[in-house]
Amino acid sequence: MSEGHALLPQASHDERAEQLFVRDLKSYVAATIEPLVSTTADQLDPGAAHNARAEETYRQLQQTDGFADYLALRRASQNLLWSLVSHSVERQRDALDAAAAAVPARGSLTLDPDFVQPAYLADRDVHLMPGGYARDPGGVAQGALMDRGGAVYMLGRNGGFLNDGRGWTLASHLKTRWPEHAPGRMLELGCGIGASTVPVALAFPDAEVHALDVGNSMLRYAHARASELGATIHFHQGNAEATPYPDASFDCVFTCVVLHETSQAAIGAIMKECARLLKQGGVVAHLEVPQRYDSIPLWTQVRGEIELDYNNEPNWKTAISADYAAHLAQAGFIDIETGFQDAARSATAGDYSAQSKGVFHSWFVASGRKPAS
Amino acid sequence: MAEKLDVPYRRRSSIPGISESGDRMVGMIVALTAQVAAMRERIDTLEALLEANGTLPPQAVELFVADQAASIRRDGLRADLISKVLQPVRDAVAREAQHRRGSSQGGGNV
């Protein structure tokens, strides 16, 4: 029996053991080593009055041996994850391409031969994934790498091998805030391998669902994967800041943990693009990581610096510091709310409140509506 | 031929306080440990299968006592492993000893 779904790269006996080892190694680093580093960080804290408190703590930590060892171990575990999963996917590459080609296609796939990826993705591989999101090594391999690697990376906390927890949470948010809204056409910007698009499409079976991202291989895989999972989705290659769709062509546009992988300028540009794409009265929703910079402990702020420097997260600190209500208002949206949506496993209304229930228990969501006239 | 998936990722920052070789060493140690973990799990699978098939009575591995010949063989395997793994250290101290002996005798570099 295959894990997750029929297109997910399967692990041999030893590959599974290797991947479980990486999962447990990462857990050990996070649960055993990291609290000790965090204690040191507290001791080096220059105080709340310091105007660059987290940055100064980070600078001081970098003078300590233990922190260097922690950084090296943390990055090595991430590097190992991709190395092991790459070898596993490589072994079954031809079979995955054949399986993807054999799935009866639903929806569509439109690639752009002239596409140029945004600069913030071109100079680094986010999460250290070899080749990054836009690489096209041929076939579906890069998407398969991202799917299997992502499931191991999330340690099973986001819906196991389907990695669909955020998509269900986004759907739950729409049902919570706009229970009467029945979107005819929906669009996800930055869909990746469609892990969140699929549950949204299944939650809104009457909607025509579109999804956009940067990578050929990733999108080929996403299309086959969605078809395999019974979701009809139209995938497009494109840049979320300037999409190929006409004005006022969607009833709902959303993102799931995309903004922290863009840039400061791109956040504003994506907000404006959402306003352009939505019909009057249409709904916009951006789901992000649940940490908010002003309300998180010093250590979590320091870890934001680490994510930037050693996990190649291009926009982590900006995204968790951003004033999304102001961004949405500036783009012309109304009925704006920001808060934390309970993590969901189905598209039913849930709690949406001002308080985070913690990582993987709730997700930050900023949403609003385009004025009706 | 298609591009291999496992290529070096782009944008690797250096870690203050740790040398590039020390950083690589950490990477090699965690990779090696993953292989040890996979091997250990394979042995566990084999034991479980052998037990399930009735080839190996429960606890047979725990109760196994090596006879003299097996003990000698194992001593050799262990010594071989230790010498192979610790060879870089042995070489380093050997060079150092050679160098000091050479210096005291007015010799040159090793």
Image (cartoon, coloured by chain):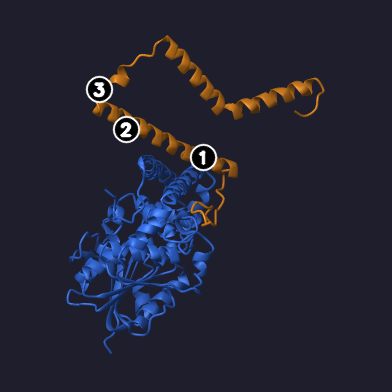
- What is the CA distance from the residue labelled 3 to the residue labelled 2? 14 Å
- What is the CA distance from the residue labelled 3 to the residue labelled 1? 36 Å
**Residue B43 placed where, x, y %?**
36, 30
Mark 1 burial class by Cα count in 10 Å: few <14, some 14-19, many 20+: some
Q: Is residue A81 above or below residue A177?
A: above
Q: As shown in the figure, which amino acid type bears the numbered disc 2?
A: Thr
Residue closest to the far right: B106
Q: Give a yes or no on whether discs 3 and 2 share a subunit.
A: yes
Drawing shade for chain A: blue
| Circle 3 or circle 1, nearest the eye | 3
- What is the CA distance from the residue labelled 1 to the residue labelled 2? 26 Å
Mark 1 = which residue? B28
- Identify the subunit bearing mark 3: B
Residue under the point 45% across and 51% down: A90
Q: Is residue A193 visible?
A: no
Quadrant of the image occupied by residue A171: bottom left
